[in-house]
Image (cartoon, rainbow, N blue to C red):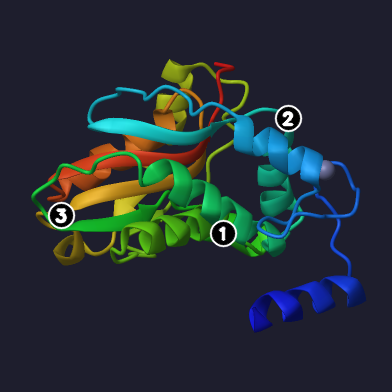
Amino acid sequence: MLKNLIKGLSNLITPRYCPVCGKKASREDIPLCRACGDVISSLETPANLVLPPLDIIWSCLPYEGAVRECIKGLKYRKDLSLVPMLESVIKKTILKRPLFVEAPCVVVPVPSHFLRRMTRGIDHAELIAGAIARSFGVPLLRRALLKIRATGPQTRLHRRERLDNLRNAFRVSDKTALRGKHILLADDVVTTGATLSACADELIRNGALSVTGITLARSMRV
Ligand SMILES: [Zn+2]
């Protein structure tokens, strides 16, 4: 109760604004206005994607409208107030999926090249990976997989070209931490799955037992 009171008072002093539409954020649970929050809460979970060498790719939300704005807000405007909202969405949708694996699990974010991380000032995949790790109660391995080569933008490329663009771009830096583990590979958005596949190839080649992809959103535009 005290926590809610403090939260209510802090909202009065520094009102938050909805990152999607700019109106006052009125919801208690997530930093959005009521209308945008209702839109996100009512979205259907996208279908799973089966894409070897990954066992499966799960996504929480479709990459459209308010969801796209929230992800852009996190990625490009470094709006960290969105993290609790995204975490609650991940918890709500991901924990419904049974994780039938015997091996110990660890969460690994899809890595960005260090220059990209420096210029952006935020590692969105790592924030999402952290939320997944907390939801499942499993360890987060921040730098077990690295992106060792900067790659051009993927958006205008087809799947085959994306795979070529990503060849030899990722490298495992800590084989011991990954050996025999089931990896939950986390990213913000999946489109063709080329990035997740390239990462999963490298993880499995270096002793990971299996890989499940988990993304906040799935884009249907391929
Ligand atoms: Zn709004």
Q: Is residue 72 left or right of residue 13?
A: left
Please give the name of the residue rendered at 62% of the width and 38% of the height, measured from the top-left corner. Answer: 41
Q: Is residue 23 left or right of residue 156?
A: right
Q: Identify the residue position indicated by label 3 in the image.
A: 181
> Which quadrant does the C terminus fall into?
top right
Count neighbours of disc 1 (C-alpha within 10 A) and say few if under 14, some if 14 to 19, many if 20 or more.
many
Identify the disc placed on residue 65.
2
Q: Amino acid at mark 2?
A: Gly
Name the N-terminal-most of marks 1 and 2: 2
Marks 1 and 2: which is nearer the front? 2
Name the N-terminal-most of marks 2 and 3: 2
Cα distance in 3D space between marks 2 and 3: 36 Å
Mark 2: secondary structure: helix
Count neighbours of disc 2 (C-alpha within 10 A) and say few if under 14, some if 14 to 19, many if 20 or more.
few
Identify the disc placed on residue 123.
1
Residue 68 seen in render? no
Mark 1: secondary structure: loop
Q: Amino acid at mark 1?
A: Asp
Front residue of this view, candidates 111 and 212: 212
Q: Is residue 8 left or right of residue 98?
A: right
